[in-house]
Amino acid sequence: MTPMAGADVFAMDPDEVRKSVEILFEIEAEVDAQAATMATANAEAAGPLKDAATALGPALEAAGEWWQVHRAGGFRGLVGNTGEYLAVCAEEAVEVDDYNAGTFASVAGDRYPERPNANASSRPDW
Amino acid sequence: MSELTWERLRDLDCGAIRTLGDAWKTYVDQQLAHTERLRTDVIDGHLGTEHYESDTATQVRDQIAMTADRYEDDLSDYASTRIATTLLEAADAFEKEQNELKELVPLIEQHDFEIEGPHTEYDVNLSGGLHRAILTLDPPQWLCDMCGVKKPDGFWDIDTLKVLFDSVDLYGTAIGLAGQYQDWLRSVMSRAHDADEEAAAALAEMRENPTELPPPLGATYDDLVDDYKDSVSEEVAGEAQAIAEGTSGMSPEQVNEWWDHLSDAERQALIEEHPEWVGPVDGIPVETRDTANRTLLDSQIDGLGDRIAAKEQALQGMDPESEEYEKAKAELDDLKHDKSDLTRLQDRITDDDGSPAASNQTGQDYYLLGFDTEGSGKAVVAIGNPDTADNVNTYVPGTGGSLTGAGGGLLNRADTMAFDAQRLGGGDETATVLWMGYDAPDDLIEATDPKWAEGGAADLESFTKGVRATAEGEPSNFTLTGHSYGSTMVGTAAASEGVEADNLMLIASPGASVDTASALGVDENHVWASTNDEDAIQYAPVHGENPTHEEFGANTFTSDSPREGSDWWKFWEGPAENHNSYWDQDDLNTPANEANDISRDNQAYVVTGQEERVR
């Protein structure tokens, strides 16, 4: 393992950490896509139930959206956040409390050019 | 609020709802692969300690594990238990009522009736054509057959005159039949609306108080993650409280899934620290509820003892002539009454050494599934374990039922039913439950009011669903037996909320809230009624058609009337006494296991699935 600058923070094998990052970003993307598929199926089924004036129809539609945005979306966001943090770690030592999305944007350019979150200036913690 | 109409219910694609429920279950499995990958490929793989080591590294691994834990709980609690199970339960419930409509609506149309009124309370009336047909002395063949008259052939002959003279009867018969279909339709829609609203509530409540997510890595993470860990430690208690207080919107099946998902440590902590959130809850296994309820029972008896002592001490300092004293004395009497009832129940279900007692009639253990001293008091006690039994018979008592009776005569009666099921059950295990789970009317005047049954309907529905949810292995053959007003309770719950039962037995019934067995949501071939010849209740069908009458459409069985008045001139005593004679041992000289008490035998045959032996 390579001692990083500020070696009291941690030591690591950067390649292994980057492999973790790739897995985290893959999971993030898959969870996002699968939640969208599920939400679409949910909304399609909720439609006829709403047309039938059931109480279930609107509740189902709201539940599907809530799941996609807040729970699957919450998980996806946390996985992505951890991936971004580790991507930074693979380049430079940073404590958890000192990390923000801007740090990732500064290291993401070459290595993760396709990642939308590399453009971190649009994020609230920039 | 559900505004489902009968036409929309008829046309609803229940298969699509079920398919979506299955899709959510599949989705959950798919997502669990992601958390599995986080643990194996990241935490224990590329990000293992051999590649990434320090306090910070440990913190990051913990964060990933927390994120995976959270998502797994979310998938179980929300995506599976809430969304998928709600959809699957709703699909089953809608489909069941849809099948009722498929049977009912053609009957309504064939008889030239019309469905009118708002979806909240449909009427089934005679159509204009049917009115005209009767008025013009040309009634349809089915009506002539029902009234026993020959359909006129268009000429003014004797048959036409008969129809003219019988027109009142023809109208009455047609209106009566329309009324039965109306009861049936209203019951179908009541249960469908109930299922719809319960499903919507389960989904809405899910979003009301969601659990927190772990904080993202970044500024103030250390503080935020401590807060998160605190919230996780309180999460299960919060869920349990909401379930017990009825604010979670979860069905017993969903409660059961939630309970199964808890760790052993979480379950044990709830049982020990909050038995009040475990004991009364439908959907939690019977053994666990019994343990929690016995703890609660001990605790309440002790608490009442303390309150009685404090109240007695307070009384000593009061003026015995004062209003304050009178009030305190009344409160003291109530406390003593409650303590006496609970102690009696405890003595009945507990051995001298403090361990759970067994019925002296069957040797089966008693299980305490709930109790309450509020009002007349409630208690639910099982003889034998419903979770493992082949048959479950739930006895719902009627007027005068109370906590006092639950520790005495009512439980004796349930013991007799258990004995009969064991005696005639051919080796099958039958659990018999005394469900004194509603505030029963205190007297015959109160018993003319349906509000007692309406007040208990949702609880009885929940209880039956709980029995189904916690059953181990194959579902039991489940019978609901209502006696007297208890049959009104059973009928009301079955018609308005829906009950998960295979058989309904309406004994000495003043009416089951509807005029036809078809409205009860249980195959009418499995609805049974019996009233003995001497029972006065047959003259008081105040809650709908007498279920033993042919028009009601239930199966009937014979019950004897063994009791007599104390003197020949006390003509009223026999009819009153025989209202409660259905579990008598008629011939006390015959050993109980050789007795031939026809009503008891018939009940046992229904309960143990031997309907062909019913006489």
Image (cartoon, coloured by chain):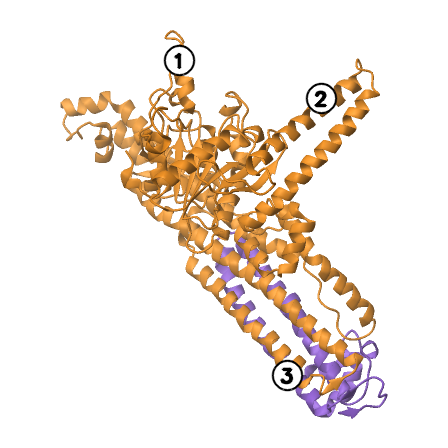
Chain colours: A purple, B orange
Query: Which chain is disc 2 placed on?
Result: B
Taking A20 as reference, is B248 above or below it?
Answer: above
Are labels 1 and 3 assigned to the same chain? no
Is label 1 in a helix, a strand or a loop?
loop
Tag 3: amino acid: Ile
Q: Which amino acid, by three-letter code, is at mark 1?
A: Gly
Mark nearest the camera among 2 and 3 is 2
* Amino acid at circle 2: Ala
Q: Which residue is label 1 attached to?
A: B565
Q: What is the quadrant of residue B504 in the picture? A: top left
Q: Residue at x 77, y 93 (%)?
A: A2
Would residue B224 appear left or right of B254 to someone viewing this image?
right
Element on which disc 2 rests: helix
Q: Which residue is mark 3?
A: A23
Disc 2 to disc 3: CB gap under 8 Å: no
- Work out whether residue A74 or residue B282 is closer to the camera in this orientation and state it: B282
- Name the spot of residue A8 as percent of width and height, x first: 85, 85
Instruction: Determine which quarter of the picture holds residue B254.
Output: bottom right
Determine the chain carrying the residue at label 1: B
> Which residue is under mark 2?
B330
